[in-house]
Image: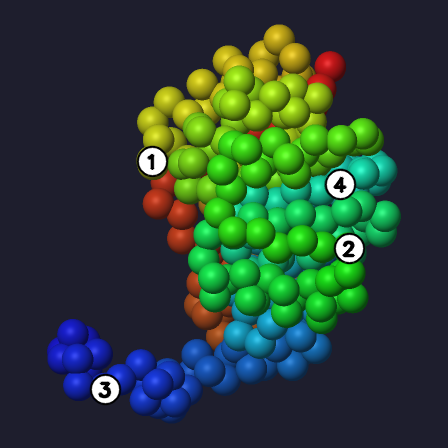
Amino acid sequence: MGALYRALLPEGVRARARPFIYAGDTLFRAALWRAAAGRVATGPFCGLRLAPRPYLPHLLGTYERELHPVVDALCAREWKRIVNVGGGNGFYIAGLGMRCHDAELVVFELEPTAREVIRATLARNGLAERSRVLAAAEPPGLEAACAGEGPTLVVMDVEGAEVELTDTQAVPALRRTTLLVETHEFAKPGCRELIELRFTSSHRITAIDTAPRTVADFPAELAPLVQRVARERCAAAVQEWRPEAQSWLLLEPR
């Protein structure tokens, strides 16, 4: 039935019909958006302005909560430049830019439509003038982005391409760079061990593992009534739907 529905109705028609077909979800999202006033509600990037219909863990501020202490600690340091590899919708580059007022911002993103969202998010938060939004990262482009004087922070989430992009032979600037890398064992088995091996002599390595999400992660103070009447939706809203448990590596030059 779903395939027939998609075959018979163009995406534009489906998009207009979706709020009515999924009225409960539409009302739930609208209530959270209104309660948060279109800004990230909690977490390290609290107050960041988001594009309409955001990913709910972004709006709630619960996204990658395991990293919140790490992000806060990184934002307390001064950076010459911040490079986000795999920019998505701009959540990390804009959030880090909001916290790190003097840093140059560079973001790589493969998808053209996502790059437009990133640009809009940066502009919405007054960050466009010190930002560069680039297409897919390749080792030469990443090397150019990281080169230069002053401390550099790289935040990387590239669905397995971290194997190629953390090669310090191809990107030698990474040897003196601080990195926060999400590893994707389901896409590239052995990638975490390989990255650790590459940086073990030059960097201090801290591993952070994902943890389960429950309704207790939902910020009740944001919308107490919503949590009482839509508990199951609130539990679903904080889920990140990862294919399996994952890890991040924080790599800090010695």
Mark before the other along the chain sequence, 2 or 1: 2
Q: Secondary structure at mark 4?
A: strand
Disc 1 residue type?
Phe
Q: Residues within 10 Å of mark 2 (few under 14, many from 20)?
A: some
Compared with residue 169, is residue 183 higher up or lower down, i.e. above or below? below
Counting from the top left corner in percent of width and height, residue 32 is at: 60, 75
Mark 3 packing: few (<14 Cα in 10 Å), some, or many (20+)?
few
Asked if one can make out residue 157 in the rendered structure from this viewpoint, the answer is no
Nearer the observer, disc 3 or disc 1?
3
Q: Which percent across, then down, holds residue 110?
A: 46, 52
> Mark 3 or mark 2, which is nearer to you?
2
Distance from the alpha carbon under mark 1 to that under mark 4: 31 Å
Q: Secondary structure at mark 2?
A: helix
Pointer 3 residue: 9
Q: In which quadrant is the N terminus drawn?
A: bottom left
When asked about the image quadrant of residue 11, the answer is bottom left
Residue 77 in the image: above or below residue 62: above
**Spatial separation of the CA atoms under disc 2 and disc 1:** 35 Å
Name the residue that disc number 4 marks.
81
Secondary structure, mark 1, is: loop
What residue did someone put label 1 on? 186
- Residue at (61% x, 21% y) in the render: 172
Does label 1 or label 4 sit earlier along the sequence?
4
Where residue 147 appears, x then y in whole percent?
A: 70, 31
Q: What residue lies at 52% left-to-right and 51% top-to-bottom?
A: 135
Asked which quadrant contains residue 232, the reply is bottom left
Q: Amino acid at mark 2?
A: Arg
Badge 3 or badge 1: first in the primary sequence:
3
